[in-house]
Image: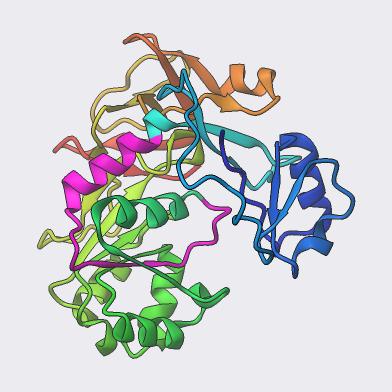
Amino acid sequence: GGYVPLDPAYPLDRLAYMLQDSQPAALLVQGATRSLLGDVTVPVVDLDQNTWAHQPVSNPQVPGLTAQHQAYVIYTSGSTGQPKGVINEHAGVVNRLLWMQDAYGLNATDAVLQKTPFSFDVSVWEFFWPLFTGARLVMARPGGHKEPAYLCEVIAAEQITTLHFVPSMLDVFLAHGDVSQGAGLLRVMCSGEALPGGLVRRFKQQLPGIGLYNLYGPTEAAVDVTAWNCARPVVPDNTPIGKPIANTRMYLLDARLQPVPLGVVGELFIAGVQVARGYLHRPELTAERFLKDPFNPGRMYRTGDVGRYLPDGNIEYLGR
């Protein structure tokens, strides 16, 4: 079974639509948020009640599970009409997590600050990466991801080594926080927006010696599919998104789905194990965005983003 996050901060009509569209088998709520959901026809589990006492202590044995079963459905913003539920499977999520561990190596001395609202897929690695590597998972307070002073305090108090920023929030953090409290950080991940070179330079100046990594990927491909280490001495104004991660392929194609030459702008397509199953109950849209891969077995996802290859094989992102 997959999980569907329903953010209590969302408008009521959006929550109602997501519930009606996803048709969950059960709904987990807290007393304070139950009223947001109106009349629901599915079983409701109130997490404030002791509903777990009568459950068996061992996990149920479910025969026939495979890596192709769904892990979660996260709804994208729906800037073009109704929100779309993206079905991601276990194989893609696990690949993403194992790559991250290979690349950045958490251990029992690390602490990850979980501050992304769980309706965004960055939260997936924030939850599961520390839990499967023996690191500590520290939950920021609700809304804390928008408060630089609070973030600085919690980084120092909890000895956080690892956290994520969207670039615009990293900008605010560097401008308004007491970043000397962040001296114990080891690695900062950026994704979700283009990362300006000027921001990378400020980060290196204010937090010298701390790793900064630029990641790229849509909800439709298990969080991130490319990565770039910002540690190079030369910082380009438009920070590259890097190269594909493990078991992932990136294609830059023209309007006829042919590869473009080095340096020529093309549309980004993603192939490999992390490509999502598709959109929940949206077969036409799924067929439009998830295409047969013309170069290898399997499917590829049409991102709608454009970019180009740099001479060293890294990809530069150039917008939608």
- Residue at point 20% right, 73% down? 204
Picture quadrant where residue 156 is located = bottom left
- Residue at point 50% right, 34% down? 60
Picture quadrant where residue 109 is located = bottom left
Image coords of residue 320 (percent x, y): 51, 42
Give the image's coloring scheme: rainbow
Residue 304 falls within the magenta-colored stretch? no
Specify whether 77 is left or right of 112. right
- Residue at point 31% right, 34% down? 95
Camera-nearest residue between 35 and 234:
35
Instruction: Answer whether residue 275 is visible to the viewer in this image.
Output: yes
The segment highlighted magenta reads: 93-120
Residue 94 falls within the magenta-colored stretch? yes
Image coords of residue 80 (percent x, y): 71, 40
- With respect to residue 101, does 204 lie above or below? below
Camera-nearest residue between 245 and 21:
21
